[in-house]
Amino acid sequence: MADQREDTCGAHQHSASWDEGDRLAALDRYAILDTPREAEFDDVVRLAADVFGAPIAVVNLIASGRQWFKAEVGIGADELPLDVSICAHAILQQGIFVVPDTTADARFTCNPLVTGEPGLRFYAGALLETPDGLPLGTVCVLDTKPRPDGITERQRLTLELLARQVMTQLELRREIAQRDKRAALLQSEIDARRNLEASLRTSEQRYRALFDTIDAGFCIIEVLFDGERPVDYRFLEVNRAFEAQTGLVDAAGKRMRELAPDHEQHWFDIYGRVALSGEPIRFENEAAALGFWYDVRAFRIGAAKERHVAVLFTDISERRRAERAIQQLNETLEAQVEARTAELSLMWQTSPDLMLEIDFDGVFRRVNPAWTKLLGFSETELVGHHVNEFVLPEHHDDTVDAYETAAEGQHAQVENRYRHKDGSVRSIAWVAAPAGSITYAIGRDITKEVEQRERLQQMEDQLRQAQKMEAVGQLTGGIAHDFNNMLAVTIGSLDLLKRRIGAEDARAVRYIDAAADGARRAANLTQRLLAFSRQQPLRPEPVNANSLVAGMSDLIRHSIGGDIQLETVLAGGLWRTHVDPNQLENVILNLAINARDAMADGGRITIETQNAHLDQRYVAAHLGVGAGQYVLIAVSDTGSGMTPEVIAKAFDPFFTTKAVGKGTGLGLSQAYGFVKQSGGHVKIYSEPGEGTTIKVYLPRLLGDHPEHEPESLVQPLPLGEEQELILVVEDEPAVRQFSVDALVELGYRVISAGSATEALRLLDANPAVSLLFTDVVMPEINGAKLAEEVRRRRPELPILFTTGYTRNAVVHNGVLEPGVQLIGKPFTIEELAARIREALDTATS
């Protein structure tokens, strides 16, 4: 690469060994200036622009006071003044002249083509030198963007090869021009002799001299066809260079198949097309049978029916060998790079920390496998997406600040929170550094550390809250005590006074009743003061959910409107629960209104109650849920349903899918908070287009109640028999595995399928299947349609359905027929054992 010298802007400091007059004279001898465009030179600039990926490429000849372009791409002009020429500097250098950034080179900072349009920033040019070493100009490429790394060795070689090709063309033109001059002199002699025969002989001699003296191989062939298919060609004429270029001896008059039987068919096809179409062609190809690579130009001559083709070709085998050597060198270098990066690749693949490549716009370009292990997302789910699609909204600004800091060339550190694919949250601490146009970052999982900090903060908040409420409690307790003492005296005295007066003085009795009523209202006020001092303003009491739902049915019907049907299915023998009834009414009403909003075209809302038991298997999969007996209140609708992404955020405060002004996004979060505060659990079952069921589990109120059964009594489980084979069909892998494990534990043989299609294949392959245990809602083919096909193939086979929706929701929504065998999720192993046994025994009987 040429040095960038601090010369005066635009000045050409001529220090070369040649004389400018000699150089201009040499340029004149080629007679190239102001000649029309020629395809040979146009091909060179197009190839140069393509190889370099540059918008501008030029064959530039430096004349007196101007630079003239024999061929150009991207300039749109035939010439420009010499004082704006970068090539004028290039001819003063030896070898390739490269300017990576013109704005950083003092010679070009005031060049109007740099400071103005088109805004040139990069230049690379190879000299066009005569055999005497005089520079005529350059073959150059230019770009409007700087290239700090300059050019590669392969690009350098390509530019030199293109420059030699241009000089070859110039030499060929000059040689032809000189031959033409000699021919003109001969022609004048022939005219002087006025002897046609002598003139023809002289012309033939002139032609033959040109034909035999050029270095390139030349021949005229007659293409031979079998019908429309070219099968061979005969050499009519060959020049002296032909034998050196091909190795074929005495070729004139002979066929190519005779001289080289293994010559490739594609050569005959190419010349056949030229002979038939008359369109000239230029190409490079290998003649393996001859052991050469050729640069070939072929064109038809004479009448079309003669099928004669003139072929001018040059041996480029040496160039191709050089290109192959360069390719092998590059492969060797690539192997060395791969070896050196193996350790980094191993670290990338095995590191437990998150690693990424991200551009300055915040878009993932590459991630390591730790992302899948830590956050559940595959590389294809991340690459091409913006980082904030996975970062919690409250950390978006900090994340943007971090990668913008890296874009400015500085190291950056940031802590943010990512949402796991399963909906959970991970806290990550990042260190990032820029490299070129990419930022590299490493993230460490600090979730446990953050949770510890948050727990400590929560404990501090709870301590401050407790201290505050203790002070408020002491104050309100003292006030209430004093008020109650005074009110006790007041109310007691008024009661005694009323008894003594009796009913004789109605006016006095009226005054006494008024005073007593005021005292009782004051007593209620003291109770409110006491309630204010508590952290949770709930008033739990024993509640019968059946009575509560029945009592608010009219209110719900009024709230949801006449287009939606309300159905209540209240279980007999329902346990009682200990909650605030007013808050519970608010929860049920809120769920009903949400269900209404999901059914714009009308539908059905079903409110059900059940006794439920959540076992250890269930609570192990649901953080924060305690095992035990619960009162279940389920609200189902036939509406549009929810996607997994919406379900994951359904309980987030202020999250809503409703239009602006149609909802606050607080309803479900308030319901969730109340249920959690009451020791309960909320679960959503929903799929797009299949409606929604929200199940509220409230702890059973234990005590001296007839429906309470001691948990210490363990009933024996009904077990399976060795010959009984159960086919389990469930699209959720975790639920499917639980079902299989439970049935195996119960003594059954089990096979399982993740889809209805797979289930039918297994059923056909296993005639010993005793029972089909299938989910109701599955993608593509649901459980009901699967059952129809199974009954067609095996009418006697018992079927047990399972679903996260309630029985009434799936039956009345038209998914299942009434009377089918159905077990709701979540189910205990005891419930599963009983229902499987019941289905098998019913089918047997």
Image: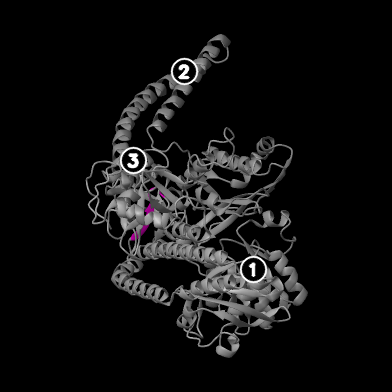
Residue 125 seen in the current view: no
State how far apart marks 3 and 1 are (Cα): 79 Å
The secondary element bearing badge 2 is classed as helix
Residue 354, given in percent of the width and then of the height, sits at 35, 59
The residue to which callout 2 is attached is: 494
State how far apart marks 3 and 2 are (Cα): 108 Å
Q: Is residue 657 magenta?
A: no
The residue to which callout 3 is attached is: 111
Viewport quadrant of the C terminus: bottom right
Q: Nearer the viewer, residue 464 or 597?
A: 597
Q: Is residue 355 magenta?
A: yes
Mark 2: which amino acid?
Leu
Mark 1: which amino acid?
Thr
Mark 3: which amino acid?
Asn
How many other residues sit within 10 Å of disc 2, few (<14), some (14-19) or many (≥20)?
Answer: some
Q: Which picture quadrant has residue 836?
A: bottom right
Give the dominant element type of the magenta stretch: helix, strand or loop.
strand
Mark with earlier residue (2, 1)? 2
| On screen, residue 593 above or below 251 | above
Chain part drawn in magenta: 354-362
How many other residues sit within 10 Å of disc 1, few (<14), some (14-19) or many (≥20)?
Answer: many
Q: Nearer the viewer, residue 179 or 591?
A: 179
Residue 46, given in percent of the width and then of the height, sits at 48, 58
Residue 763, given in percent of the width and then of the height, sits at 67, 78
The residue to which callout 1 is attached is: 774
State how far apart marks 2 and 1 are (Cα): 72 Å
Frontmost of labels 3 and 1 is 3
Q: Are marks 3 and 1 in contact (CB under 8 Å)?
A: no
Frontmost of labels 3 and 2 is 3
